[in-house]
Image (spheres, rainbow, N blue to C red):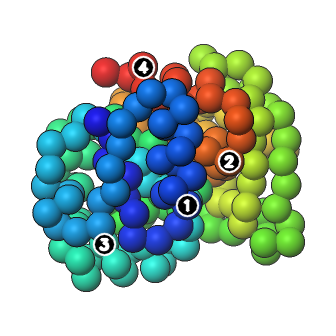
Amino acid sequence: MTGILSVQGDFLEHEAALARLGEESFEIRSKEDAERDFDRLVLPGGESTVQRKLVGELGIYDALQRKIEAGIPVLATCAGLILLADYFRTLPVKVKRNAYGRQSASFHVDSEFSGVGSIPMTFIRAPCIELAENGVEVKSRVDGRITGVQFGKQIGIAFHPELDSDTKLLSYWLSIK
């Protein structure tokens, strides 16, 4: 069972993508939701500043922090990448917000994700990873910029796999135990 942070952003798209793979999920909107038992966590795209504010105000932070530090598999997409690196501080990378420019500079490419193969990547006001510390595996690059990493059971990506029909990356993440 996957818990999806659902205070803002594209959580519904993640729910639908996971359902296509047969993965049950539920929305994390409150402290009680965050304290439920679940096997994995999605931090979706959206507006990281708003998500951060709401996670704090709703009392969700501590429960998610404990689960992440305990080793639950995490998929952090776009704004979720920023949260995992800069707010929860469990992904040892330096993230640059809006690295590709404004919403109008959004784009789509097919590129290699190590261990998965070539996958579609949709970038929307995307960040990039400027620095990956020791122990962080760089999984993808686009135009020389780091766009995907893995650190233990945490995957941080600058793009949105939930917006494409290709499910290889989500299947890979679901295989992490």
Q: Quick check: 22 left or right of 119?
A: left
C-alpha distance separating marks 2 and 3: 24 Å
Question: Which residue bears the numbered disc 4?
Answer: 175
**Could you tell which of marks 4 and 1 lies nearer the N-terminus?**
1
Residue 54: where, in percent of width, then height? Answer: 34, 78
| Residues tagged 1 and 3 counted as in contact (Cβ below 8 A) | no
Residue 168 versus residue 146 in the image, above or below? above
| Residues tagged 4 and 1 counted as in contact (Cβ below 8 A) | no
Residue 160: where, in percent of width, then height? Answer: 65, 49
Q: Is residue 177 visible?
A: yes
Q: Residue at x 52, y 23 (%)?
A: 172
Question: Which residue bears the numbered disc 3?
Answer: 55
C-alpha distance separating marks 1 and 3: 15 Å
Residue 72: where, in percent of width, then height? Answer: 26, 37
**Could you tell which of marks 4 and 3 lies nearer the N-terminus?**
3
Quarter residue 153 falls in: top left
| Residues tagged 2 and 1 counted as in contact (Cβ below 8 A) | yes
